[in-house]
Amino acid sequence: MGAMSTPTITPAQAAEREQRVAEAIHSAEMEGLDVSAAGRADADEYVAGRIDSDELVARAQARYGLA
C-alpha cells in the first residue's frame, strides 16, 4: 500500500496502533535497545494513518540497510 496522502483510519484504529507501537517500543527498551528519533517519527506517521505497516517496515529496513 505504501505512503498515504491523508489519514484513512478511524480513531479506534489509531488508538490500537498507538498501543501496539507503545508495546513494541517498551519491548525494545526491555531488551536494552534504543528506538531512534527517526524510528519514533515513522511510528507516529503510522499511528496517524499517514503510512501503513508495510511502509513502516520498509523504512526501518532501509534505515538499517536490510532492504
Image (cartoon, helix red, strand yellow):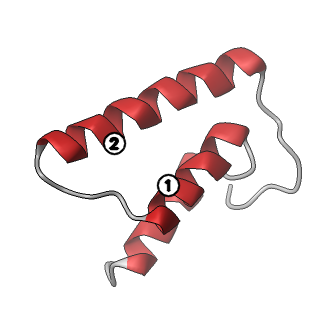
Is residue 9 among the parts visible in the rendering?
yes
Instruction: For the N terminus, give its image quadrant.
Output: bottom right
Q: Secondary structure at mark 1?
A: helix
Measured as percent of width and height from the top left, residue 48 is found at 71, 40
Q: Residue furthest top?
A: 12
Relative to 13, residue 44 above or below: below
Q: Secondary structure at mark 2?
A: helix
To which residue does mark 1 refer? 40
Residue 16, located in which quarter of the rendered image? top right
Which residue is located at x 19 percent, y 56 percent?
33
To which residue does mark 2 refer? 25
Residue 24, located in which quarter of the rendered image? top left
Q: Is residue 45 left or right of residue 42?
A: right
Measured as percent of width and height from the top left, residue 59 is found at 51, 69
Amino acid type assigned to the residue bearing label 1 in the image: Arg
Mark 1 closeness class: few <14, some 14–19, many ≥20 residues within 10 Å: few
Measured as percent of width and height from the top left, residue 27 is found at 22, 37
Amino acid type assigned to the residue bearing label 2 in the image: Ile
Answer whether labels 1 and 2 touch (C-beta < 8 Å).
yes
Q: Is residue 17 left or right of residue 28?
A: right
Measured Cα–Cα span from mark 1 to mark 2: 9 Å
